[in-house]
Amino acid sequence: MSSEQIRVTVWNEFRHEKTNATCKSIYPNGMHEAIASYVRSVSGCQARTATLDEPEHGLTQDVLDQTDVLTWWGHVAHSEVSDEIVDRVQERVLAGMGLIVLHSGHMSKVFRRLMGTSCMLRWREADERERMWVVKPSHPIARGVGPFIDLPMTEMYGEHFDVPDPDELVFVSWFEGGEVFRSGAAWTRGLGKIFYFSPGHEVYPIYHNAEVLRVIGNAVRWAAFSGNDTVKPFYGANCEPLETLSVKDYQRESIDHAAARENL
Amino acid sequence: MSSEQIRVTVWNEFRHEKTNATCKSIYPNGMHEAIASYVRSVSGCQARTATLDEPEHGLTQDVLDQTDVLTWWGHVAHSEVSDEIVDRVQERVLAGMGLIVLHSGHMSKVFRRLMGTSCMLRWREADERERMWVVKPSHPIARGVGPFIDLPMTEMYGEHFDVPDPDELVFVSWFEGGEVFRSGAAWTRGLGKIFYFSPGHEVYPIYHNAEVLRVIGNAVRWAAFSGNDTVKPFYGANCEPLETLSVKDYQRESIDHAAARENL
Amino acid sequence: MSSEQIRVTVWNEFRHEKTNATCKSIYPNGMHEAIASYVRSVSGCQARTATLDEPEHGLTQDVLDQTDVLTWWGHVAHSEVSDEIVDRVQERVLAGMGLIVLHSGHMSKVFRRLMGTSCMLRWREADERERMWVVKPSHPIARGVGPFIDLPMTEMYGEHFDVPDPDELVFVSWFEGGEVFRSGAAWTRGLGKIFYFSPGHEVYPIYHNAEVLRVIGNAVRWAAFSGNDTVKPFYGANCEPLETLSVKDYQRESIDHAAARENL
Amino acid sequence: MSSEQIRVTVWNEFRHEKTNATCKSIYPNGMHEAIASYVRSVSGCQARTATLDEPEHGLTQDVLDQTDVLTWWGHVAHSEVSDEIVDRVQERVLAGMGLIVLHSGHMSKVFRRLMGTSCMLRWREADERERMWVVKPSHPIARGVGPFIDLPMTEMYGEHFDVPDPDELVFVSWFEGGEVFRSGAAWTRGLGKIFYFSPGHEVYPIYHNAEVLRVIGNAVRWAAFSGNDTVKPFYGANCEPLETLSVKDYQRESIDHAAARENL
């Protein structure tokens, strides 16, 4: 990461909290503040927030350049996110920014852009029980919770979830109504690490749940860039050979292919 | 697949063949005809062609609906492919159409849309030798060639290749100039299977090479849909539970979450 | 595959059928005959059977050499399978024989040898419902069944299932008692393809279920070798360079490393 | 990890250093001391060594229980490693110990046990150049080196490398003689993380190379357990349901399956 502290930007659509009384009562300052408040308590992390209705959705180039990990929650206003900001977020992810996509963010432009698929799923809002099982216990994102996380009341998200096969599948959920869901899944895109984590419907106090928050904190630490950033300058380069070529008079741009082929 | 025969559409930008004398001499009818001609010789396959300058780039909804596998070659005119056609191709891939992306097609809008990354790489045009090693011999795409494919003269494509980690890595190439490349790689997107295969620079007779053609034929057969198409109707559905829920008076849309939560 | 027909050997421990009245009533000729009988009805497949108490467990070198795909069911007598036969089966898988491991075969010596892990899981025998969801609909093994397979009465197998991350995850199961399970999963080992499929407790008529059988038939066709068998002779070879080396006097075995290093 | 410091045990066969003058001159105290000395310089790491000819090969239960990450180098004496110690190492890996397998350790009993394959490859000892390309720059193991690592003189290790498809492929090597190799690859087995890293022939000063050592240090930090260890007690458990089952009189062990099935 580019600083000693992991700099997290917690992004929220921030619409339900203004119109839905239940949501407002659970998250009086918005879901983003609930999440950011927790992230600030995680050792080595700092957090700011950004929301849809701010200028440039709060995601100016400067903010993104100073963001190591971005978390994303959106639902009813995906279409209001401008394509220019989506381009900007994608570019930053490919350059190494981590991305944590939460719940209904599965249908965000940002996530769909990075996945290349519809990202659709089955759903049901019926106050039912979910049990998130750890299927990859070696993964740092699963650290500090039990063999499963029990959520007494959630929205159901079920298969088929139209995403590329995860590079790492960390959680699989069981639902009371009979469905399963790949509810914690990780991918790499460019230099950036992406984690999708499904809990979080706006009318349940999910982002006050200690285990859910623990996983988000783990994910932030996992997603912060820790790789090799020397690879970047090579993107798209026309480059000199590292070894002596047998075609002796090789000169970039001026090669006479027809003549060269006679040596075949 | 939706018919007894695999219906292949071979798409080509078809520009170099009109302006570059070397390319024209190698492919007098265009690269698409060289490829389609081979595909027609593969048992169980039929092929038509489509090119950029045809109306709708030759990829009308009707043509795509009758295509089981699409192959894609483009280079200098990626930007001329309309976004509407890119949407259409993506939708068909997610619905089960196979896609074979060839050589400089790595920078096509279609491939970048489905990968979610820049798809950039290092390159060099220097008439050098490439040796494509089979690293997953169990894969049907590697069938019928030796432990490696020797290409005496190619364009170099080198790492880092900015694509998502392949679901299956079939070939890795060695280049005389000192680079390596993941030159045969497979992904799934939705119901569709995608194979990227790197040989094919326009001034080399690569699509007359028997082993390269053999791999393309294998890839076509592999990419034709052979999965479960009943999953499709569930995309995006709000759905009834399959089990009896403990929240007894569950009624879709009208649930009183606040009351329900009191049972927590 | 090495013949026009896929030659399947259906292996069964064949002990419960002799001692458990329920099992005997469901499978009067043994589970192997129920499975083999179905396989024989699949186009392009032929089947023989082999059981633990036959000489060499029915898996002589000759039988294995003439087997394209082996299916494996065992439970109470895993320890009675001789290590010599396990070696033989492993060697054949690495050389390209497909392997379908069924239900309690997860604890077989053969499967554990090929996975390298404990292959343990949680279980419960309680006549409960299982619903196997298709999570990779593009996969040929999921062909011909619906979005899920409903099994009204099964033994529960639950996570954590201690296997290597599957190369391809095809089914995930939901259980009435609250668990989930990666119930259809595929790996490659050497030239061989392996599929683990969890349904099949001996006191339920699972191998009379049309959808379960359909999946087994799909798996057999998928697992039959269709790759590149020229790779085999290279295993373990000390080999000559394919290019001219800069160390001019390279001679295998007699190289003077100390002198050569002076050129560094 | 189970302590604040990562406790590394560097294991070495330690035979070549006693018999080969070149090897002895490069590693007067053995390769293990060269590696351990570097590991001790890595922040947060401590290291001890163990060698084949010590009692229990230096890998007593107590030593392994106090080891977070084990590194393994062996070559001429793989067969002298006792199966009991191999069992012990495997068990510790499944329980969360990290394992770094170096160079000719690819043929060690320990690595083959965990992979389930032959782990064979092509090789040549010809003082030739190797260039290890980073193909997954997001990975922490690739941190701190350039886009490739240049090794002027190494033993060639080439494809096909008979290992399971890596969960993560970090490095791919180019060799002067015309081969490629998946030279840095990662897998998970149970709770344990495994990294294979190919440089290290005994007659080259590879373990004095700063970039090779840097990668080994990165690998040690990556392989130290950072996951969820609550999953362990569930291995192999027969367990009570978490939900109320519809078969009302469910009692473990005494269930009357025949009667229960009449409710189907």
Image (cartoon, coloured by chain):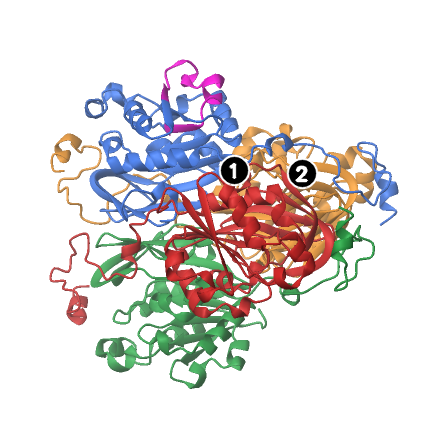
Chain colours: A blue, B orange, C green, D red
Q: Position of residue B179 (x, y in %)?
A: 69, 43
Q: Is residue A254 above or below residue B40?
A: above
Q: Position of residue D102 (x, y in %)?
A: 56, 54
Horizontal side of A18 relative to A195 (left or right) equals left
- The local crowd at label 1, few if under 14, some if 14 to 19, many if 20 or more residues have their Cα within 10 Å, is many
Q: Is residue D135 above or below residue D162?
A: above
Q: Is residue B121 above or below residue A176?
A: above
Q: Residue at x 61, y 30 (%)?
A: B81
Residue matched to label 1: D138
Say which quarter of the image contains residue B19: top right
Tell me the subunit letter for badge 1.
D
- Find numbered disc 2 in the image and state the secondary structure of the residue it sits on: helix
Name the amino acid type tagged 2.
Answer: Ser
Q: Residue at x 64, y 28 (%)?
A: B80
Stretch of the chain drawn in magenta: A48-72
Say which quarter of the image contains residue B125: top right
Residue D236 seen anywhere in this rendered image of the structure: yes
Q: Gap in Å between the C-alphas at discs 1 and 2?
A: 24 Å
Of marks 1 and 2, the one in the foreground? 1
Q: Position of residue A46 (x, y in %)?
A: 37, 24
Name the amino acid type tagged 1.
Answer: Ser
Q: Which mark is residue B104?
A: 2
Q: Is residue A58 magenta?
A: yes
Q: Position of residue A244 (x, y in %)?
A: 80, 42
Q: Residue at x 39, y 33 (%)?
A: A220
- Find numbered disc 1 in the image and state the secondary structure of the residue it sits on: loop
